[in-house]
Image (cartoon, rainbow, N blue to C red):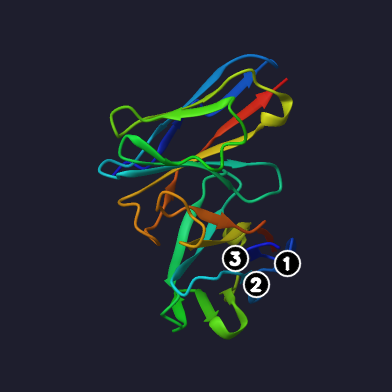
Amino acid sequence: GAGVSQTPSNKVTEKGKYVELRCDPISGHTALYWYRQSLGQGPEFLIYFQGTGAADDSGLPNDRFFAVRPEGSVSTLKIQRTERGDSAVYLCASSLTSLLGDTQYFGPGTRLTVL
Amino acid sequence: AQKVTQAQTEISVVEKEDVTLDCVYETRDTTYYLFWYKQPPSGELVFLIRRNSFDEQNEISGRYSWNFQKSTSSFNFTITASQVVDSAVYFCALSEAWGVTGGGNKLTFGTGTQLKVEL
């Protein structure tokens, strides 16, 4: 079956602009996670959804970052007033449930570059 | 303190050599899960294995094997007879309940080990 998909694969924007990154999880997976990976680092947790609700957004760096999952499937990560420090690969993952230890499957990521 | 430490930043081996990637973790939980993921140059994280804290049996899958030792908080990964296709960054990750809000299953990753296998 289809894996996690993310669009766009690459996004170049100018400082101060608004961007949206989209994630389409594996069909039937109720939990969806966003991570951010900077160069040479491991992915860092941003936010997780169980169904439509954001159950844990403790990893969002500040209020410029926001994410939604209105119908419990596709999710959009939104970044306002982008800064150069936001440049990174944004990874989305999904798992069948949100139970501890359930395996997360990752998408290919969106590489965001803020000029 | 790092929750997941992968002290080896980069390892280079010649094809057919065996190589072990180290992972040391830190948690207050008695129930937790450990994972290994592979990130090839294409960038997508590929799931390799999951292990829960109550299962200390070593596991072998083809050329891959994992050694989980709670006494030393380590979950090491060995590739036997390495191949060029094994070249990638390998990440160890921890899933724990301690201090996690909203339930869930967020992963804490190490900084990864870059493995280069040369002919």
Q: Secondary structure at mark 2?
A: loop
Q: Secondary structure at mark 1?
A: loop
The quadrant where residue B76 appears? bottom right
Q: Which residue is mark 2?
A: B22
Report the disc number at residue B83. Answer: 3
Q: Which one is earlier in the sequence, the residue at label 3 or at label 1?
A: 1
**Residue at (45, 32) in percent of width and height:** A6
Q: Which one is earlier in the sequence, the residue at label 1 or at label 2?
A: 1
Q: Which residue is mark 1?
A: B7
Inspect the image, locate mark 1, and give the three-letter code of the amino acid beneath it.
Answer: Ala
Chain bearing tag 1 is: B
Q: Position of residue A67 (x, y in %)?
A: 46, 29
From mark 3 to mark 2, how far is it between C-alphas? 19 Å
The quadrant where residue A113 appears? top right
Question: Where is A19 relative to A102, above or below?
Answer: above
Callout 1: 10 Å neighbours few (<14), some, many (20+)?
some
Question: Where is A113 relative to B116, above or below?
Answer: above
Chain bearing tag 3 is: B
Of residues B59 and A20, the one drawn nearer to the viewer in this rendering: A20
